[in-house]
Image: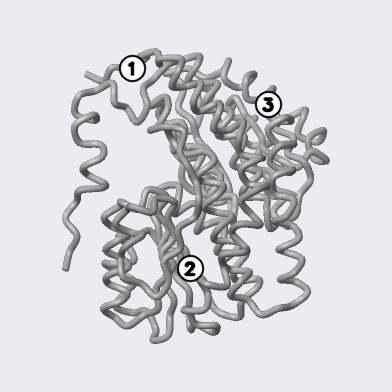
Amino acid sequence: MRRLGVHFDEDGLDLIDGDIQREAATLASAIPALRADLPRVVAALPTSPSRVYLVGCGDSLDGGIAARYAWERMMPVPVEAVPAMTFITSVLDGAPDGALVVALSQSGKVSRVIEAVRGARTRGLSTATITASPSSPLAHEPADANWVISFDKVGAVPGTTSHLLGTAALYELGCALADATEARDQRRAELDGLGELVERTIAACEGPADVQAQAMDRASPVLALGYGPTISSARYTVRKLLELTQLLALWQETEEYAHDEYSLVEARFRVIQFCPPDRGARRSAEVAAYLKRLGVHLSVVCDRLEAESYGSIADVVYPVPTCPAFLAPLAYSIPGQLMSLATARRVGGSLYGMAEQVHREDGDPQIYESEIAP
């Protein structure tokens, strides 16, 4: 029987809160440091790869999903974000000569990510690793470039600052590999403002997160919808809920929801919809209206200028400060952090489900100690 409703030691939740609150300052200081270190990293990498694979698991894969679109707008090559196991089993053999594999793991211990790097090198592909742990296996795994970014975790808690920092590192690496153009320089200027954007987003979204937490309970499944780069925000939001509360939560691409989950969604659902102000905005508004007809509790994450238009449809609106589309996946991930933390304070749970013995015993080993294929 699952031990649900376990209440956290408040110190653990306070650590997560502190991690969220340090994001803005951490990113403001990290961006210049990342950029200063990149000439060394890119010197060993191809300037014109035939294809790029951004490989990771969990939060790191979400970073790749967000960064993939930014890279493709700066580099004239196809870029793909690939789960590490899918890469090693199904993508690697068909990867073209001259491809570049970028493997991100904050801990540097994830077996499948290490395996992906080894497989890529066996195929003769160029490889770069990114980790925040200088003593980790990934930091010492043979690769064309090993990049260790400076970051200290506040404890064994689900990643918040680490997710934004890892994603920002991917963005910066894409900028460094791209040709020096006005568009590339504009992306870098936008990254310079990331710390301030994060600070303003937290301030704007803390209140709505507290309101949404009041509607969360264990009888109500959670569905997160996003598209394009904000698929990463939807995935990440679901993961934080799973890691902190063990609520039943799933994600889906916005349009695919209409073909799939629509068949079972009804009033007991809590739906979080990510609605950036791009060419999908009208469709997002249509889907939101249909969701409301189903009677769900609807939360919308949108640009603050669109907040009023969703006010009559959504139960909760997260008014994200207007930002470049390039940075939207990072800003739109913050409501999920805040909401998951507020929900954990209300309904309980345990970090990574470790209130259960089997999760305590098997959680880390199945990720970090899994056999790496030769």
Q: Amino acid at mark 1?
A: Leu
Between the C-alphas of marks 1 and 2, the distance is 38 Å
Q: Position of residue 18 (x, y in %)?
A: 56, 27
Secondary structure type for disc 2: strand
Residue at image x 61%, y 43%? 26
Q: Going from the N terminus, do you reach mark 3 or mark 2 first?
A: 2
Q: Give the image quarter of residue 141.
A: bottom left
Name the residue that disc number 1 marks: 4
Q: Quadrant of the C terminus?
A: bottom left
Alpha-carbon neighbours of circle 3 within 10 Å: few (<14), some, or many (≥20)? many
Instruction: Give the camera-side residue of 64 and 158.
Output: 158
Instruction: Give the camera-side residue of 227 and 59.
Output: 59
User: Is residue 278 visible in the rendered structure shown here?
Assistant: no
Name the residue that disc number 3 marks: 316
Q: Position of residue 11 (x, y in %)?
A: 45, 17
**Along the horizontal axis of the image, is 182 left or right of 170?**
right
Q: Give the image quarter of residue 120.
A: bottom left
Q: Position of residue 236 (x, y in %)?
A: 50, 42
Between the C-alphas of marks 3 and 2, the distance is 33 Å
Of marks 3 and 2, the one in the foreground: 2
Q: Quadrant of the N terminus?
A: top left
**Along the horizontal axis of the image, is 340 left or right of 357?**
right
Image disc number at residue 80: 2
Between the C-alphas of marks 3 and 1, the distance is 26 Å
Q: Position of residue 363 (x, y in %)?
A: 25, 37
Marks 1,2: beta carbons within 8 A: no
Residue at image x 50%, y 71%? 41
Q: Amino acid at mark 3?
A: Val
**Along the horizontal axis of the image, is 146 left or right of 232?**
left
